[in-house]
Image: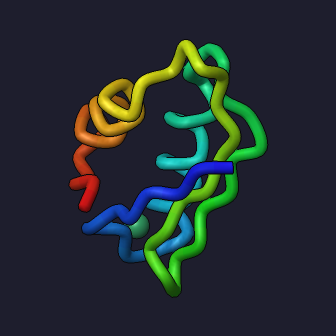
Amino acid sequence: MATIKINGMKCQHCVSSVTKALASIKGVSDVSVNLETSVASYTADASVSSDKIKEAIRKIGFEPA
Ligand SMILES: [Cu+2]
């Protein structure tokens, strides 16, 4: 299980956008995003780089911390 802090999430809409974006990456599963702590947790295959995760987050307008 990996975690990443994400800046810019303000409501449940943001949470669901981030959840969907991460879950749609091939090799990523068990995505869970906590609005209060601004932390997303997920399970990723070895083929998924952290850059790929960050890129997916930036693409939808949030900033990985
Ligand atoms: Cu929002």
Q: Which residue is drawn at 51% across and 21% down?
A: 48
Answer with the quarter of the image where residue 25 lies: top right
Residues 4 and 46: in front is 46
Does 11 sit above or below residue 30? below
Q: Where is residue 15 in the image (x, y as percent from the top left)?
A: 53, 61
Answer with the quarter of the image where residue 38 lies: bottom left
Q: How many labels does the image show?
A: 0
Q: Position of residue 33 (x, y in %)?
A: 60, 62
Q: Position of residue 13 (x, y in %)?
A: 51, 61
Q: Where is residue 20 in the image (x, y as percent from the top left)?
A: 59, 38
Q: Residue at x 54, y 59 (%)?
A: 40
Q: Residue at x 49, y 82 (%)?
A: 37
Does 32 sit above or below residue 52? below
Does 58 sit above or below residue 12? above
Q: Which residue is drawn at 52% across and 76% down?
A: 35
Asked if residue 2 lies left or right of residue 32, the reply is left
Quarter holding ligand 1? bottom left
Q: Which residue is at the far bottom?
A: 36
Asked if residue 21 lies left or right of residue 45, the reply is left
